[in-house]
Image (cartoon, rainbow, N blue to C red):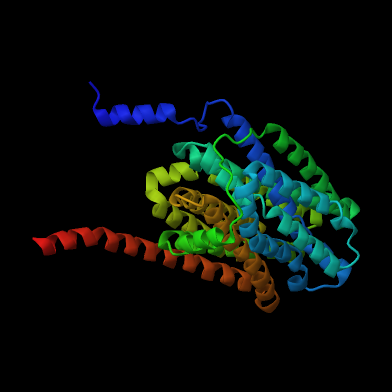
Amino acid sequence: MPPASTKAAATHAAADTRLSPGAPGYRRTSLALFAAGLAAFALLYSTQALLPAISAEFGATASAASWTVSAATGALALCVLPLSALSERFGRRAMMTASLSVAVAVSLLVPFAPSLESLIALRALQGAALAGLPASAMAYLAEEVRPKALIAAIGLFVAGNSIGGMSGRIVTGWVAQMWGWRAGLAAVGLTSLLCVIAFRALLPKARHFTPGTLNPRALASAVRTHLSDPLLVRLYVIGALFMTVFGAVYTVIGYRLVEAPFSLPQGVIGSIFLVYLVGTVASAAAGKLVGRLGRRGALYLAVSTTAAGLLLSLADSLAAVLAGLVLITAGFFAGHAVASSSVSRTAKTGRAQASALYQSAYYLGSSAGGTLGAIAFHAGGWAGTVLIGLVAVLGVVSVTLYGSHSARVAARRPRLAAAACN
């Protein structure tokens, strides 16, 4: 006869009605959130590949034009926590739908911005609207998907982000080359509208969501609880630092490739973002990496890959730059998938707030990376941008090493206490 513990585990698994691979609704949920991630990243970074063209039209420097990206990610970072609180009251599905709908509506106004200042303002509004998606999506998956399938499900959502970032930049690049950057932004808006329609049609109704009340004190208490958890804080810092690298590299790369010795046209520069496909694979493989190497091992691999890509990109060879971007993208998306899924698994209560804090740190890292990367490029060229990335990479290593040390100390304490008693 099987032991009682095995029977209990089997009974619990049978009683767990959450989604798992092969179960009805799992595929629809995965596809819906893939579409949502695709639309969100396409919109959020829609101006990034167009920064040289925007600079040329408005007579702006790289650091000034970079605010069309940094304003969006910064507004998202500031708004993600309050909107996650609203999702606790009105539901993850409703919040995600409203968030994407408003962002798409704003995207149809963005191509008509008469000045750089108005473009930045509209982009900030768009980022604030998108803030309702990331934390709600993570919380929705944590509630509706079984724990063993959670990393894979979140990995697919992150993969949607990578596809969205890639397709948005490619579409804007080629459309802009033919009809101008405004037409490129309009094309992304219309494409994202189709994704939102698919998302709403596919996503099943939540079966495990319990509405809460809008209680500011409870929200503040949940935030304090999460910020007092050392592991969660380390994950937030890791997400911010990874995104600092990514924001710096992809905000500035267009300026580097449009100049000598590369002198590439806008459409070809947009096509460079095909390397995002590597991010799709890396995100989806994050669960297997954690299974083989453990969370910290997977993070070390991700950060080593990112650092190697930064160094390789210094060469004045298009092949080397492309190879460097491949490594940076793979390392970033793998690290992000590991860190974000670890947040969802670590937080036992207030998952929306835990995910919101991660997203806030993550997108603040994007804003900081984009702005600092552009300033460094203006001061020292591409080598300056790479230096910003390497400093952030060193930060990830330091935080992960500190986490390893803390885990060893915590594991040693019970043994020391037992020896003292004896």
Residue at the top extreme of this rendering: 1
Q: Is residue 304 visible?
A: yes
Residue 106 lies, in percent from the top left, at 82, 54
Q: Say left or right for 170 vs 175.
A: left
Task: Work out whether 265 lies above or below 20.
Answer: below
Frontmost residue, 383 versus 27: 27
Residue at figure coordinates x 53%, y 58% from the top left: 218
Q: How many marks?
A: 0
Q: Say left or right for 271 vs 55.
A: left
Task: Work out whether 194 lies above or below 175.
Answer: above
Residue 258 lies, in percent from the top left, at 77, 63
Residue at the bottom extreme of this rendering: 379
Residue at figure coordinates x 59%, y 51% from the top left: 213
Q: On the image, which quarter does residue 215 sit in? A: bottom right
Residue 368 lies, in percent from the top left, at 63, 69
Q: Is residue 312 visible?
A: no
Frontmost residue, 41 versus 419: 419
Q: Say left or right for 42 vs 145.
A: right
Q: On the image, which quarter does residue 420 sit in? A: bottom left
Residue 341 lies, in percent from the top left, at 50, 48
Q: Quadrant of the N terminus?
A: top left
Q: Quadrant of the C terminus?
A: bottom left
